[in-house]
Amino acid sequence: MIEFEGVAHRYGDRTVLSEVNLRLDEHRVAFVGANGSGKSTLARMINGLVLPTTGRVLVNGLDPARHGRTVRRQVGFVFTNPDSQIVMPTAGEDVAFSLRRSGLSKKDRAVRAAELLAAYGLDGYADHPAHQLSGGQKQLLALCSMLVLEPDVLVCDEPTTLLDLRNKRRFVRVLEDLEQQVVLVTHDLDLLGDFDRVIVLDEGRVVADDDPEPALRYYRKLVD
């Protein structure tokens, strides 16, 4: 359960979000809007990467501003550019690095990492140089590095922007099968037909909140 209560945010004198009130309990929710609409700022509040100027955010009843470490254990975050998340030389080491505080032995961390990579289409890539993977493979690696922590929520901030159409569709199919609640920020409207809910932001405000078809119809009229 994710809640935004009277949330507003400013960068200096510029207002990015104004009076956002939302309660998200659906399995798959998307934020859409033009560049600068506030959608990424709103998404980053879910795990405390950005804190509200006013109002509050609750994740399973916890405020990231006060319980950031606990919330971040419950919320995984995938960025637009996977290179910003890959920190280890090989794919297996990168996933295992996420488990460094798990209490598992180094061997068990490596086994768990290889298992997860195999489950998400990277079987046999555990020893492959991480930065030599294709764009689609890198994004799957970034996803695995979050999923290995078994979060309750996965927030993806425009994760398909750098991918070709085939890899975009592949990545979204992976999201469809996840048990976690997924919050997706995207410009790829054609990928949202099966989502449970689409929220449209414009100039920092929620202007539409509905099933995908009516919400996206509203957004397309808004930008025409």
Image (spheres, helix red, strand yellow):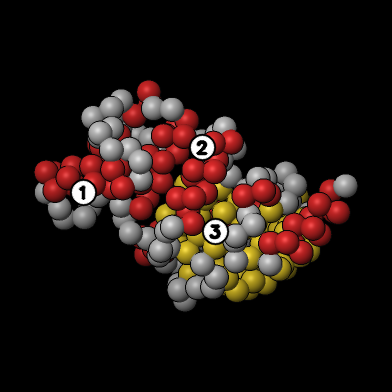
Q: Which mark is residue 112?
A: 1
Give the image location of residue 10, x and y in percent: 69, 54
Whether tag 1 and tag 2 are in contact, CB under 8 A, the answer is no
In the rendered image, is residue 60 in sight? Answer: yes
Give the image location of residue 178, x and y in percent: 42, 58
Query: Label 3 belongs to which residue?
Result: 183
The structure residue drawn at horizontal position 54% and vertical position 36%, both measured from the top left corner, is 166
Residue projecting furthest to the bottom: 61
The structure residue drawn at horizontal position 25% and vertical position 33%, both measured from the top left corner, is 124
Crowding at dot 1, Cα within 10 Å, few <14 / some 14-19 / many 20+, comes out as some
Q: Label 3 sits on what residue type?
A: Val
The structure residue drawn at horizontal position 52% and vertical position 49%, both measured from the top left corner, is 172
Q: Earlier in the sequence, mark 3 or mark 1?
A: 1
Give the image location of residue 13, x and y in percent: 75, 50
Give the image location of residue 222, x and y in percent: 85, 53
Crowding at dot 2, Cα within 10 Å, few <14 / some 14-19 / many 20+, comes out as some
* Residue 163 as seen in the image, left or right of residue 177: right
Q: Label 1 sits on what residue type?
A: Arg
Q: Which of 18/91 is in front?
A: 91
Real-space Cα distance between discs 1 and 2? 25 Å
Is 152 situated above or below 31? Answer: below
Q: Which mark is residue 167?
A: 2
Crowding at dot 3, Cα within 10 Å, few <14 / some 14-19 / many 20+, comes out as many
Q: Label 2 sits on what residue type?
A: Asn
Is 160 situated above or below 201? Answer: above
Q: Which mark is residue 87?
A: none
The structure residue drawn at horizontal position 42% and vertical position 63%, both measured from the top left corner, is 180
Q: Earlier in the sequence, mark 1 or mark 2?
A: 1
Residue 106 found in image quarter: top left
